[in-house]
Structures are given as structure tokens and as C-alpha cells.
Amino acid sequence: MAEESGNGRGYLAERGWRSWAFTLDHKRVGAMYLWTTIFFFLVGGVFALLLRLELLSPQARYFSNHTYNVFFTLHGSMMIFLFIIPAIPSGLGNFFIPLHIGARDVAFPRLNIASYWVFAAGFLVIIGSLVAPMDTGWTFYTPYSAKSTSAVTTLSFGLFLIGMSSILTGLNFIVTIHKMRAPGMTWHRLPLFIWGMYATSIIQVIATPVIGVTFLLLVAERVFGVGFFDPSKGGDPVLFQHFFWFYSHPVVYVMILPAMGIISEVIPVFSRKPIFGYNAIAYSSLAIAFLGFLVWGHHMFTSGMSPLANAIFSFLTFFVAVPTAVKVFNWIATLYKGSITFESPMLYALTFIFLFIVGGLTGPFLGALATNVQLHDTYFVVAHFHYTMMGGTVMGFFAGLHYWFPKMTGKMLNEKVARAAWALIFVGFNVTFFTMFIVGVRGMPRRYAEYLPKYQVENVISTIGAAVLALGILVMCWNFLQGLRKGPPAPGNPWRALSLEWQTPSPPDTENFREIPVVTDWPYSYGKPEGPVA
Amino acid sequence: MDNALPFGAASGQAARVDAVFLMILVIGVFFFFLTQGILIYFAVKYRRRRPDRDNETPAITGSPLLEVLWILIPSIVVVVIFYYGWRVYTDQRIPVAGATEVYVNARQWLYEIKYPDGRTAINEIRVPAGKPVKFILSAADVLHGFYLPDFRVKMDMVPGRVTTLWVQPDRPGNYQIFCTVYCGTGHSNMLAQLIVMPPREYAEWVEQGGRGGGEGGVHEPLAVRGERIVKNAGCLNCHAVDGKEKIAPNFRGLYGSKAPLEGGKSVTADEEYLRESIVDPGAKVVKGYPNVMPTFKATLPKEDIDAVVAYLKTLK
């Protein structure tokens, strides 16, 4: 084990902007993605706070209705396209896939940095679209998006580029995982994070072209007046929804599968136990990726689809719940008879499970047709997907950031501050979003700038929760910056983990491994007497 | 009407939806306490007590029996939930014979109502209690939604297509209608009412020509009647009376003011200008307010327009 680390600067040694802009090092590309996506996470969060501020009162008080609509559009599209889709795969995935499989880099390093710059071109175009900010919601539903005078065309082009970057990254990862594994790293010795990333990359490569084409059709509709979605020209507005959700439903698994991979890494390390049900967790990722392609229609139960199509989509939707539940059960079983400690990565991992269970158990209300027709497009849906996406993916992302911070930066975080931030985030999150279930059941529709006064109490509580949540995230970010600036040097393997990335110095050298390791065991052999001791 | 579950269901149909909701809730709460309980119990019970014994945790790597069980049990549970959700939904979708038909056409940002006998209204649907009602939904410009929270149903309104929805309103009362598909700036102001009347009152109201809805009466002052119409016809979705300007000129102070028009001319807002702007909104368009207003020529009779003008004159 490499214990000589802690003072070297590893892959960070080279300085100057060229060393970043033209880097071929997957770790630097990953780090650039992380900085970028966290920046957009904070910007998207500011928009969320502005929305919550406006919703303090039933009448428009601070912003006009149009401004509110622009804010929720920007909140949604930034969080989805510029944060939650790229953050874990392109950020942490780039950094850790080669380290996990014992490789020196991804299969195509030049393509990797090219994907980052395509991504950067995409977000620059998106920022450019702010001259006439879009107010269509992140879902771009036609005919409104075809008629809107805002910069829909520009934004579509930006998202097209983002999608292209996503496809390139996915391709790169698939080839890397197939071809670059160290000797002895069989498929069943892969860390579960890699299984999650593998399933994710497949979805990215298969589904993303569909949204790219959809954006092109939308642009053709707006610029050339082709009537794909315009009923007066023989088109169909609902067709757009099919195209849109054919990508955007599978993509929720692009968001959640890598986070589930992180949880599968963190739980065994901090329980000092082998992962329970490795095969079940690994193959359930593939099952989710597969089933995820068959359920897009559940976003459209009230769109006028035939009752038969609705019934089929509803039935299939319920079966996504099964592999997801299997993962949760296996994580919980891993804790059994462990020797559990509660450092910040573990706190976030347990929070993921806790919140994801709530998100998962509120899914059947929306999957069942009778209750979907009631709850669709109300705040119940908003609460449900924030529990899965923020309570799930974002908590998994935070777990990963805290878990790998020492490896990425060579510095340790202040654990006390990290726990304080966690407590604020946990309380703030639940106060903000649980109330949305209630106000949704009471009938409040989503995307309302103004609402009936009878919903005010819930909205005020939710806004207070959002303030606490924002404070927690600020404290967490402050802790990251403090850790970067003056955290104590990190040892090579502070958590005594067994996966390969921890066998390198912190931070790792540009080459990752001086010698490519030979793998003789899976990475979860905790609890063995000869294993690493504190 | 508050529709907090499980109370406040406005029809037998809605109560059946509530039953499905409650069933899922019971199952969900059970699994919530089961999984979270075990999660927290394990986390507390197996917390590290002796650092030197970290390496003595048992090497449990899985259990095929448990995997089969926790694939099988959730599969059965979700099929049961699917089945009941589907059954109740199917009954909702099959229209019953003899329903009162109401045509609803949505446009940014109001609902135009038409009854088969030719009566029209805006944002207000009146139906008799105890008889099924079938809504025949369409949209003129973009997608809209038609959501009756008290009846637990909604349907999208799609341009170029007709969708339907039916309910059986048993209890007289006023029920909220929301637009649930985002449709632009005025989306959250696109509200309407379903007014379920006792059958006899409904018959009387139809006999009187189906206007005014029994409110006011013959001696109602013109401006009061105008105010009521302005509220019901959706004018306030775009025109503000007080406070922040919406997407159209404010009503307060409008009468008698001089407004610049597109094309450089200007106009003094007198009675004739106000009347013309209601029946032909595109005739004189005030600068800075692109015309999105539909004509009210067919939906408001002359005396209602006079009442609206009279009301606008009072807003000094």
C-alpha cells in the first residue's frame, strides 16, 4: 500500500491554464467537470431560492409572473442539463473509473478533453440564450415552445451540444470499462460504482441521440416552419412529448445509477463488511437501465393517450420499482453485524437510503393510473422527484465528494463542519419537500406563480426549509474551500478502503499507478483478520 | 372546498380514487417503517464499539433466499397496486349514457364554455347535481389542462384534438378548476369554477336564459354587474385593477386616459373605445401591449358590455 503520499502534489503538480485546458489526464478533466457542475448547481440553487421567495405570498409580490416562469425554467434546465446529468458521470466518473479498474487513463484521452470543451461550448451557448431567457419550462412542450418569442432555438442548440458531449463521454467509458481493466479485474471483481457507470453510459449512448434529434425537429419547426408538432399543418403536439420523454425518462437513471454506485462503495467501507448481494446490485443496474426505456409514457397518462397504452405503461412502470427496491434491501443488509462508523460520507450515504425510500414509496401513487390522474402536474410530483433526484442523486453526489475529497485533493476535510452541514441539509431538505407532498395532495398545481390563499401555510413552511437547506449547502461549500486551502494532508487511504483508487497516493500521480496492479480479489473483502487496520 | 384526503371527495368516483390512494398509503407506510426501522436499528445496533474488532465482522456476502424473497414480494405488491389503480381508472374513462355535455375550449388564458343549446360562458360551468357531466375538451393555441381536484381527475387539452372527461357531481357546490399544463405567462391565473346546482335551481336558471346565474337580479346597479362580469370572464388574468401590472394595460385610471397606439397615433379611452376593445381587441392596440386578447363579441351580450364599461368608469 502506498503510504508515502500526503506531501506530493501528484497530478496537480503542473501549473498554468494550458496544463488544464489541454490536459489529457482523466483526473483533470473530471476535476474541471466537477468545478463546472458545482458552479451550475449553485446558480440553479439561487433560482430555486428566488422561486421559494416569490411563493411566500399567494399573489405576485417580488417578480412578475413571466419572471417567475423564467426562473423555474432556468432552475430546471440548469439543474438537469448542467448539473445532475454530468456531475457524477462526467465529474466523479471521469476521475475514478480508470482508478477503479486499474488503468492509467480512459480509452480515448483526447476525446475526453474534447467532450469537456463541447460541454463548455454548450453551456456558453446556453448562457448566451439568457438575452431572451426561456419561459417554456425545462420540458419544452410544443406548441408553446414552438411559438414562444424567447431564445428557445439558441437554448436547444446549447443542449444539443451538451447532449453530444454526454454521448462522447458515455462511449469513452464503455470502451474503457471493456478494454482497460487491469489483469485479474474480472467483471465480477469490478467495484459496483463501475457497474452503475457502465449501465449509465449505455443509456447515454442510446437515449441521448433521440433528444438531439428532437431539438433539431423543434428548431426546424421554429426556423423553417415545418409542422412536425403543429396540428394546423398536420403535426401532433403530443408527438413531441413522446420524443422528449423517450430520452428524459431513461435519463433519470443516468442521474440515479451512478449515485447508487457511490452508495454501494461507501456502505461496505464504513460498515467494515463485504457488500451484501453483489450480483443482485450489479445486475439490477442493468435491469433498471433496460426497463427505463420502456416506461416513458408514464409522464403522459393525462395527455390523451389511449387507456390501453396507459395501462401497459403503468404496468411496466411498476417493475422499475423491483430492481430499485432490491438495491435498497441489499444496502440495508450490508449493515447487518457490521462495525459501523458515521463519518460524513457514511452520513450522506445513509441519508440517500432514507430519502430514496421516501421517494421510492411515493412512486406507486404516481405509477397507479387512478391516483396519477389526480396527482399529475401537482406539487406531489415536484416533491416525489426532488426526493429521488435531490434526496437520492445529490445526496449520493455529496457522499462521493466527501468520500473522495482526500483522494482528489490530497487534503482532509474538517469533519465537524461537514457533519454540521449535513444536519442542516437533512432537516432543511425534509421541511422543504415533505410539505410539497401535502400541498400536492390538496390540489396545488405545479408551475404556478400565483396560487390560491388556502395553500399558503405549506408554501411558507417550504420556503423556511429551503433557507435552512441553502445554509447547509453554503456551509458544506465553505468547508470544501477551507479543506482545499488549508486542510491537513490526507494519507493514501484514510478510510481503509480496499478498492484500487486508494492504493495510490493522495492525490494520485498523473500516471495513476506506477505499475499496473494485478487484481486477485474483489474490492469488498472487509472483516478479514489480515485486512487493513486503523 | 378543501379536498384534504380522505375527506372532501366530490363524487363516488373521487371516493374510489381516495380508496386507491389510501391503499397505497397504507402499504407505503408499512414498508416505510419496515425499511427505515431496520436501517436505523442496524445503524445503531451495529455501530462500532471496539475499533480493534473491525476485522472480525462476519463475511456475509449474500443470501439467494433473501434475494428471491425481496424480488418476489415487491413484485406481488406492485401488481396489486397496479391492478386497483387500473380498475378505478378504467371505470373513470368509460363514459355513461345520458350525460350532460359541456364543450370547453381553452385559450391563453381562459376557458370558453359552450352548452349544446347554444348558451356560452367564460370560466364558469354550471351543471345540475345528480347527473353525469361529460366535458368535451379542446384548445385553441397551446396545451392546457383541465383539473378538478375535488373530483380527483384531470385531462390535458390539446390543440387539434378532442379529449374528454366525465364526472358525476352528486353534491351541489362550487368546485375549483385549474389549468395544469404550463401554458405561458398567465398559466397560474387560468382558473375556472364548476358550479353544481340543485336540479330545480338549474332548470330555473336555464329558463331565464342561462345568464347571470341568479345573482344580482333586476335592480342590480350596472357597475356592480360589470364588476361581477369582469371577475367571471377572466379579464383579471391579464388586466390588473390594483397593484402590479400584468400583461395588459391596468384597468384603474384607464377611462378618460390618453393612450399611445402602435403606429404612432393615440386615443382617448372613452366609452366607445372601451366597447370596441372588448368586441374587437385588435382594432386599436396600445403601444407595448401586443394583442393576445380574444374577442368577446359572441360571449358577452350588449348589456353585459355596457355593464363592464360602466364598471371601468368607476375605477378612478
Image (cartoon, coloured by chain):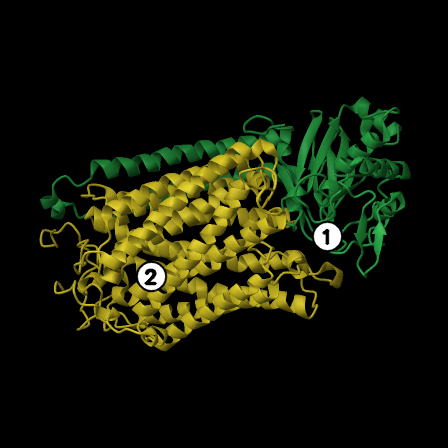
Mark 1 crowdedness (10 Å alpha carbons): few <14, some 14-19, many ≥20: some
Query: Can you say which quadrant of the picture contains the C terminus of chain B?
Result: top right
Instruction: Look at label 1 and name its amino acid.
Output: Arg
Tell me where residue A136 sits by quadrant: bottom right
- Colour that chain B carries in the picture: green
Which chain contains the residue that carries disc 1? B
In three-dimensional space, the C-alpha distance between marks 2 and 1, rounded to whole angstroms, equals 46 Å
**Residue B161 - label:** 1
Whether callout 2 and callout 1 share a subunit is answered no
**Chain A colour?**
yellow
Whether residue B125 can be seen here:
yes
In the picture provided, is B252 more to the left or to the right than B63? Answer: right
Residue beneath disc 2: A92
Can you say whether A492 is above or below B122 in the image? below
Query: Amino acid type of disc 2?
Result: Leu
- Say whether residue A405 is visible: no
Check the image and report above or below for B263 versus B218.
below
| Residue A157: image location, x then y, percent | 56, 68
Q: Nearer the viewer, residue A8 or A323?
A: A8
Placement of the N terminus of chain B among the 4 image quadrants:
top right
Chain at tag 2 = A
- Is A262 or A463 nearer to us in this picture? A463
What is the crowding at mark 2: few (fewer than 14 residues within 10 Å), some, or many (at least 20)? many
What residue is rendered at 38% in x and 36% in y?
Answer: B32
Callout 1: helix, strand or loop? Answer: loop
